Amino acid sequence: MTDRRTELAANLAKVEERIAAACAAAGREREEVTLIVVTKTYPASDVRLLHELGVRHVAENRDQDAAPKAAACADLNLHWHFVGQLQTNKVRSVASYADVVQSVDRLKLVSALSAAAERAERELGCLVQVALDAESGQQGARGGVAPDGVEGVAAAIADSPGLRLDGLMTVAPLAGPYAGRQQAAFERLMELSSGLRVAHPAANMVSAGMSADLEQAVAAGATHVRVGTAVLGVRPRLG
């Protein structure tokens, strides 16, 4: 465990250096960017070590992995982000531990999250996931709503009991006009964020960038970056 702690500490330090350098290059304060460590496929013991090392935001993309892990770490001061495609039959479970659901992309999901948050007597932060590879009215290959559908989903979140509209999220697309153009994709997300904040000023969270492209996300203006492999390494899946 000591070796694993040392490994995680070294990896975190390297990621921190990258974020700090990207902020400096973009003329931004380091405090403007929050690191979310994506702990999917890694055990609760790693989450506990990350907490010891100062990490406070962690993310998961599968409820079947996340729920037991969140329960095992319930004594820790952590903010849990759910970042995967979410089916409505998993909503009640996710609403019991997640602080923020970053992958809200359809009205049916908004309704289900609202009902679950109310039932759990919790306020659930929500990000609209934007699919920059999706045509009008369609969803992206990895989830998300087309840009012209953002306002409708956002308005539904803002009007739903138990939910709080926090902002936008995207994953750099593998197809379409932004494929291989992460910087342009993240700049487009920032344009959409600016438009969203006209009607919803408090929805200022922009989640973009992962291990390979966090610098481009910071340059574009992202407030949160989601980093997994660069911190935890490449490991076999849990199941």
Image: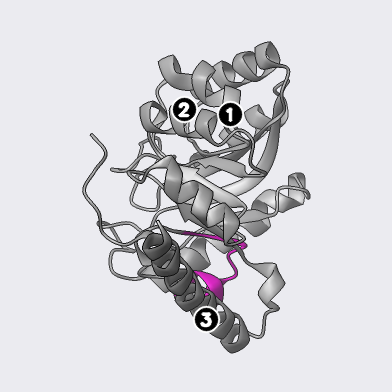
Q: Nearer the viewer, residue 139 or 167?
A: 167
The quarter holding residue 53 reads: bottom right
Helix, strand or loop at label 1? It is helix
Left or right: where does residue 194 sit relative to residue 47?
right
Secondary structure at numbered mark 2: helix
Q: Are marks 2 and 1 in contact (CB under 8 Å)?
A: yes
For disc 2, the marked residue is 67
Q: Which residue is identified by label 1? A: 97
Q: Can you say whether 12 is above or below 189 in the image?
A: below
Residue 110 appears anywhere in the view: no
Left or right: where 42 falls relative to 218: left
> Where are the magenta residues, as a range?
216-226
Q: Which mark is residue 17?
A: 3
Q: Amino acid at mark 3?
A: Glu
Q: Quadrant of the C terminus?
A: top left
Percent of width and height locating residue 183: 43, 73
Q: Which is more N-terminal, label 3 or label 2?
A: 3
